[in-house]
Amino acid sequence: MTENHSQHASRVEWIPRLIVGLGAFLLLTHLLEWALYPGSFQSFLAGGFLISLFTTIPATSGIIVAGYWLDRSDLEPTRYERIAKWTAGGLLVFLGINILIINAIFLEFFPADRQASLLVGWVRFAMSLGAACGLFIGIVEARAIERALDAERATMRAAELEHQTDQLEFFNSILRHDVLNGMTVIRSRAEFLDDDLTDETQRRHADTILRWSDDIVLIIQRVRRILDTLTESAEFVPTATDLASVVGDEVDRISATYPTVEFETEVPEGLFVAADDLLGEVIGNLLTNAVEHNDQEGLTVTTSATAEGDTVTIRIADTGRGVPDDLKTSIFRRGETGRGIHAGTGFGLFFIDSMLSMYGGQIHVEDNDPHGAVFVVELPRATQTQPAKASAKSVSLR
């Protein structure tokens, strides 16, 4: 099935070139006609040139140009076959009509010494005009289908985005009320225990509950802030964010958590990207991902950045196991599982994808040399007109 589909795709990709070839063949039949019927050249110069100039030549030239355009257009190759059918259908229908006309009047009204050359010219005219009209109709129909599909996809994306926004707002309300209120109750009870308990072991347990309660509340507040950003209805306005400062803060924070991992940073000073202070969350989650999904013993994670034109490329490379080729694309799909930033709850992946999309950036994964993975993030370079905003240290989402 896959082989048949591949063969079909290979065939339809040749259709634009075949259309160019058809136009070129029809245009070159002038030379063939002059070679076979020398008298037709004098006739062409005497008056046939004007007829061809307004009929055959524009049609055949249009076929060549349309085929050349089709090969470089953004139309899906799946539309080529239908365009070819319209072209062939137009040619055959118009040629058939003209053959009936030729059969009815040709022998009676045209002199015998010019019938052969006129017949060739008439047939060429019918083929050229019919093919050009069919090709035009086919292209117009294909573009109409593409526009309709684009509109349908846009509607589906808008509906999906609205559904996801509703889900995020629902989760936000749960965090804001139920979970946060529950943690407040847990913490208050732990404070009571800490004050009343006299046994040292039990007091340590109560202190542990207090510390974890504070950590969970901090994470909830951070997640709430992220959800507020993702569901915000106002248009996102990027700020000039100091990339070296953001990366430095995140590397300092994560290296303190993973002392056995070697972190290297190669980010030039004075490099700004169009983002906001949540960029630290994106970088922090990618760094954490590089550590948590590899053997930390002997692991090196290198963060580098380069600027080219209006784009800043950030590369977070690790010397770990790497990412299999069959996961290099699916690793970024929501709901996938396995090695990658989506492992666990999946919120990290959704957050990173959403924030990079908001920033106008993108991400992909490559192989590291000699082993490991490189997560490549591309972000717009900040312009001088964008306001600068200091970055804030962040808490990693786990």
Image: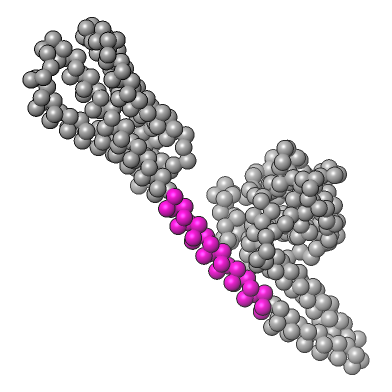
The structure residue drawn at horizontal position 46% and vertical position 37%, both measured from the top left corner, is 73
* Residue 27 pos. (x, y %): 32, 20
Residue 193 in the figure: left or right of residue 47 = right
* Residue 286 pos. (x, y %): 72, 55
Which of the pair 376/169 is nearer the observer? 169
The structure residue drawn at horizontal position 19% and vertical position 14%, both measured from the top left corner, is 117
Q: Please, which residue is most extreme toward the bottom here?
A: 196
The structure residue drawn at horizontal position 63% and vertical position 73%, both measured from the top left corner, is 169
Magenta residues, dominant SS class: helix
Q: Quadrant of the C terminus?
A: bottom right
* Residue 150 pos. (x, y %): 47, 52
Which of the pair 312/25 is nearer the observer? 25
Image quarter of residue 121 = top left
* Residue 90 pos. (x, y %): 26, 36
The structure residue drawn at horizontal position 60% and vertical position 59%, both measured from the top left corner, is 338
Residue 36 in the figure: left or right of residue 67 = left
Figure coloring: one colour
